[in-house]
C-alpha cells in the first residue's frame, strides 16, 4: 500500500473512532449512570442537527450554531422529558426503554409535522487538505477535536468537581448518597439532561456531514448501541475502548467494501464479543475505571 | 397435592379457548359474505399484522424475552417467500421457507444472545440493532447485480409483483383475494391453537416458569438458555409466516418491513392489547391498524407522532393493556352483581409463597 493511501486510511480510522465516541458518549452517560437505555438517543441527535440548521439559517455564526446551541437546546428538551415521563419509570428498566422508544417515535413525528419529511443540510465550514495524492476533509479534524474535548471535559467534570463526585457517588450507591443529603432524583435529572446534551452536541457537530431528516437518528443508533454494549458499565473507559475497537473494524471493512457492510461487521464483532464478555469490555477488565 | 383447583381453573380456560376458536372460524367463514373485496383485502392486512403481533406476544408476554427487533423476522419471512416463489413458481415450499429462514436466523442469533447470558436490556438492544442493520443492508441492494435467481431485490424500491399463494402443486392456479383471506385467517386461527397447545404443554409451562423466576427454574433443573432459544425460534417462525401473508396481501415487499416503525408498531400492538395474553395482541393489532388507516386519511399529523403518544401513554398509565383491564372490570362487575360463578377466585397463594412455606415447615 502506498504511504499516502495508508496515511489516508489511518486518518479515516481516527475520524471514524472519534465519530463513534462522539455519538456514543451521551448514550453511555445515561446508561452508565442510570442503567437506562435511551432509545430516543438518535432523535436527540436529530434535534441537535435541526437546532444547528435553524440557528445557521437564522444567521448565527456557524461554530456557535454547531457547537454551543445544540447541546443547550437538546439538554433542555431532555430535562423536560425526564421531568414529564422518565422519572415515573425509574427501576422499571423495560418500561423506560418502551417510553423512550415512544418519545423517539413522537419526536420523529413531531419534526416531520413541523418541517416536512425532506432532507436538509448545512455546508461544511472548513475545506480539505491533501495527504499525498488524496484529499481528506479538514472537518474530520474538527470532529476528532470535539470528541477529545468532550471526553476530556467529561473526565474533568466527573473527577475534579464536587458535582462529579456526587454524580459518581449516586451512581455507586443511591441510598447512601441520599442518606448523606443528596437528592438522587435531582442527580438523575441532571444526568439525563447531560446525556441528552451530549447527544445534541453530536448531532450538531455531525450536521454538516449528514443528510438532516426526521429519521436520520436511525443511521447512527445501531453503531451507538453496539458501542455502549461493547464498552460495558464504565462510561469513559468503556466508550473509549469500544469506540477504538469498533471504529477500527468499521472503517477497515467500510474501506474494503461499503459503509453498510461496515455496520454489519460491527454487529457481528459485537455479537461475538458479548458471547465472550457478556458485560462488555469494562465488565471484565478495568472495572474500577471511570 | 389435590387436583381440584387445577380442574376448576381448566374449565373456564377451556371454555374461553373454544369461544375464541369458534369466533375465529365464524369470522373466517362470515367475512367474505359481509365484506366487499376491498374490505376483505384490508382485513387480510389486519390478519397478517395480528399474526405478527402474536409472535411478539408469545416471546415477550410468555417468554419474557424483550425482542425489540421482531420486524427482522417479519422481513426475512416476507423476502424469503418473495424470492423463493419467484424462482420456484409453486408456493408450497416458499411458505415453508418463509418460516424456516427466520427460524434459522433466530436460532443463530439466539445462540449468541442466550448462551452469552446477556441481560434483558442487551437482548432488546441487539435485536433492535439487528433489524436496523438488516433494513440498511436490504436498502443498498438496488441494481441488477443484486438478484437471487429470477428475483431482483430492488433495494429501497423493494420487490413488486410477487406471485400470490396457489393450491399446493398447482402453480398456475393462484388464489384470488378471497382465497388469500381464507388462507391467512385460517392460518391465524391455526397459529392461535398451536400457541395455546404449546403454552398448555410441559414445554410452555417451563417457558412461563423461566419468565417468572429464571434462577428458580434453573435450580429445579431446566436450562433457561435452551428454553428461551426454542421459544425465540418459534416466535421467529410465526413472524416469518406473518411476513409471507404480508407479502401476499399487497403482492409487494420493501425494506420498510425491517424498519424501526414496524418493530415499534408490533410492540405497541402487544402493549395496547395486553402483555401475557394471546387475545390482546390480536385485538391490539386490529385496533391500532384501523386507527392508523383512519388517521392516515388526514395528513396534518404524522402517524409516528400518534404511535409515540400511544406508546408513552400506555407505558405510563395503562401498562397492563386493554384486555386484562377489561377482564378485571368485567369480573368485578360480576362480583358486584353477586353471581357466584362469575367471582374471580384468587388462585391460592403464589407458587413462591407455597414453596417458601414448605421449606419453613
Image (spheres, rainbow, N blue to C red):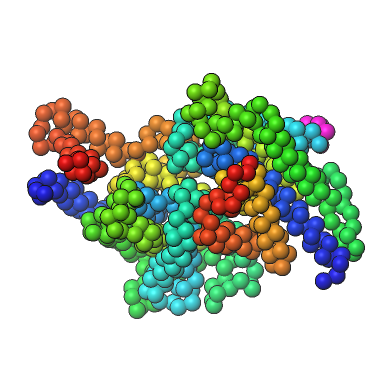
State the quadrant of the C terminus of chain B. top left
Residue A274 place in picture, x, y as percent:
53, 57
Q: Does A81 sit left or right of A246 as displayed?
A: left
> Height in image: A49 above or below A163?
below
Q: Nearer the viewer, residue B180 or A122?
A: A122
Image point 83% across, 53% down: which residue? A137
What span is in magenta? A57-62
The answer to which image quadrant residue A41 occupies is: top right
Residue A61 within the magenta-colored segment of the rendering: yes
> Is residue A218 visible to us here?
no
Q: Does A241 sit left or right of B94 as displayed?
A: right
Q: Does B350 sit left or right of B230 as displayed?
A: left
Residue B44 place in picture, x, y as percent:
37, 56
Image point 45% across, 73% down: which residue? B85
Image point 53% across, 65% down: which residue? B160
> Height in image: A75 above or below B16?
above
> Height in image: B283 above or below A192?
below
Q: Nearer the viewer, residue A61 or A142?
A: A142
Residue A42 place in picture, x, y as percent:
61, 44
Image point 52% across, 40% down: which residue? A35
The answer to which image quadrant residue B302 occupies is: top right
Q: Main secondary structure of the magenta part?
A: loop
Q: Nearer the viewer, residue A147 or A59?
A: A147
Residue A162 within the magenta-colored segment of the rendering: no
Residue A16 place in picture, x, y as percent:
73, 54
Q: Does A274 sit left or right of B329 as displayed?
A: right
> Is residue B117 visible to us here?
yes
Query: How many marks can you see?
Result: 0
Amino acid at each position: 500500500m502506498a504511504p499516502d493511501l495508508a496515511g489516508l486510511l489511518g486518518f479515516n480510522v481516527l475520524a471514524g473512532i472519534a465519530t463513534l465516541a462522539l455519538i456514543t458518549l451521551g448514550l453511555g452517560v445515561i446508561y452508565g449512570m442510570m442503567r437506562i437505555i435511551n432509545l430516543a438517543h438518535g432523535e436527540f441527535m436529530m434535534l441537535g442537527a435541526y437546532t444547528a440548521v435553524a440557528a445557521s439559517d437564522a444567521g448565527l455564526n456557524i461554530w456557535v450554531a454547531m457547537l454551543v446551541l445544540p447541546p443547550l437546546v437538546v439538554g433542555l428538551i431532555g430535562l423536560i422529558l425526564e421531568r414529564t415521563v422518565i422519572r415515573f419509570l425509574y427501576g422499571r428498566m423495560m418500561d423506560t426503554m418502551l417510553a423512550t422508544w415512544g418519545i423517539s417515535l413522537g419526536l420523529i413525528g413531531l419534526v416531520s409535522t413541523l418541517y416536512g419529511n425532506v432532507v436538509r443540510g448545512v455546508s461544511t465550514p472548513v475545506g480539505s487538505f491533501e495527504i499525498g495524492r488524496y484529499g481528506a476533509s479538514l472537518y474530520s479534524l474538527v470532529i476528532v477535536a470535539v470528541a477529545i474535548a468532550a471526553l476530556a471535559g467529561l473526565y474533568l467534570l466527573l473527577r475534579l468537581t464536587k458535582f462529579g463526585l456526587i454524580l459518581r457517588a449516586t451512581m455507586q450507591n443511591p441510598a447512601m448518597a441520599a442518606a448523606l443529603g443528596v437528592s438522587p432524583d435531582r442527580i438523575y435529572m441532571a444526568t439525563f439532561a447531560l446525556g441528552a446534551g451530549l447527544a445534541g452536541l453530536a448531532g450538531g457537530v455531525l450536521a454538516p456531514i449528514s443528510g438532516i431528516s426526521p429519521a436520520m437518528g436511525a443511521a447512527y443508533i445501531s453503531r451507538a448501541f453496539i458501542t455502549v454494549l461493547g464498552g460495558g458499565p464504565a462510561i469513559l473507559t468503556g466508550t473509549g475502548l469500544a469506540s477504538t475497537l469498533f471504529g477500527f473494524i468499521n472503517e477497515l471493512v467500510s474501506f474494503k467494501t461499503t459503509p453498510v457492510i461496515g455496520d454489519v461487521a460491527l454487529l457481528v464483532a459485537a455479537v461475538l464479543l458479548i458471547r465472550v464478555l457478556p458485560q462488555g469490555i469494562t465488565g471484565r477488565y478495568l472495572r474500577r475505571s471511570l | 397435592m389435590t387436583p381440584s383447583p387445577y380442574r376448576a381453573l381448566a374449565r373456564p380456560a377451556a371454555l374461553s379457548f373454544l369461544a375464541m376458536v369458534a369466533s375465529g372460524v365464524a369470522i373466517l367463514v362470515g367475512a367474505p359474505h359481509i365484506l366487499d373485496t376491498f374490505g376483505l383485502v384490508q382485513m387480510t392486512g389486519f390478519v397478517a399484522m395480528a399474526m405478527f403481533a402474536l409472535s411478539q406476544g408469545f416471546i415477550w408476554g410468555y417468554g419474557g424475552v424483550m425482542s425489540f427487533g421482531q420486524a427482522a423476522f417479519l422481513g426475512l419471512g416476507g423476502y424469503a417467500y418473495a424470492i423463493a416463489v419467484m424462482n420456484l413458481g409453486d408456493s408450497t415450499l416458499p411458505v415453508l421457507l418463509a418460516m424456516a429462514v427466520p427460524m434459522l436466523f433466530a436460532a443463530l442469533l439466539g445462540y449468541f444472545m442466550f448462551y452469552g447470558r446477556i441481560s434483558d436490556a442487551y437482548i432488546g438492544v441487539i435485536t433492535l440493532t439487528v433489524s436496523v442493520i438488516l433494513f440498511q443492508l436490504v436498502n443498498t441492494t438496488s441494481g441488477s447485480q443484486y438478484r437471487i435467481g429470477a428475483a431482483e431485490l430492488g433495494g429501497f424500491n423493494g420487490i413488486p409483483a410477487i406471485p400470490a399463494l396457489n393450491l399446493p402443486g398447482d402453480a398456475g392456479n393462484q388464489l384470488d383475494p378471497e382465497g388469500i383471506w381464507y388462507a391467512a385467517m385460517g392460518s391465524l386461527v391455526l397459529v392461535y391453537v398451536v400457541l395455546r397447545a404449546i403454552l398448555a404443554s410441559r414445554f410452555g409451562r417451563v417457558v412461563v416458569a423461566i419468565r417468572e423466576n429464571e434462577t428458580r427454574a434453573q435450580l429445579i433443573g431446566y436450562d433457561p438458555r435452551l428454553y428461551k432459544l426454542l421459544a425465540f425460534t418459534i416466535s421467529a417462525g410465526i413472524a416469518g409466516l406473518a411476513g409471507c401473508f404480508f407479502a401476499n396481501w399487497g403482492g409487494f415487499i420493501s425494506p420498510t418491513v425491517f424498519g424501526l416503525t414496524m418493530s415499534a408498531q408490533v410492540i405497541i400492538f402487544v402493549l395496547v392489547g395486553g402483555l401475557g395474553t394471546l387475545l390482546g395482541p390480536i385485538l391490539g393489532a386490529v385496533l391500532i391498524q384501523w386507527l392508523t388507516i383512519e388517521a392516515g386519511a388526514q395528513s396534518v399529523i404524522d402517524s409516528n407522532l400518534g404511535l409515540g403518544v400511544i406508546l408513552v401513554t400506555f407505558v405510563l398509565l395503562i401498562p397492563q393493556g386493554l384486555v386484562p383491564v377489561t377482564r378485571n372490570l368485567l369480573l368485578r362487575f360480576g362480583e358486584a352483581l353477586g353471581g357466584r360463578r362469575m367471582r374471580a377466585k384468587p388462585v391460592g397463594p403464589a407458587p413462591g409463597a407455597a414453596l417458601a412455606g414448605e421449606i419453613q415447615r
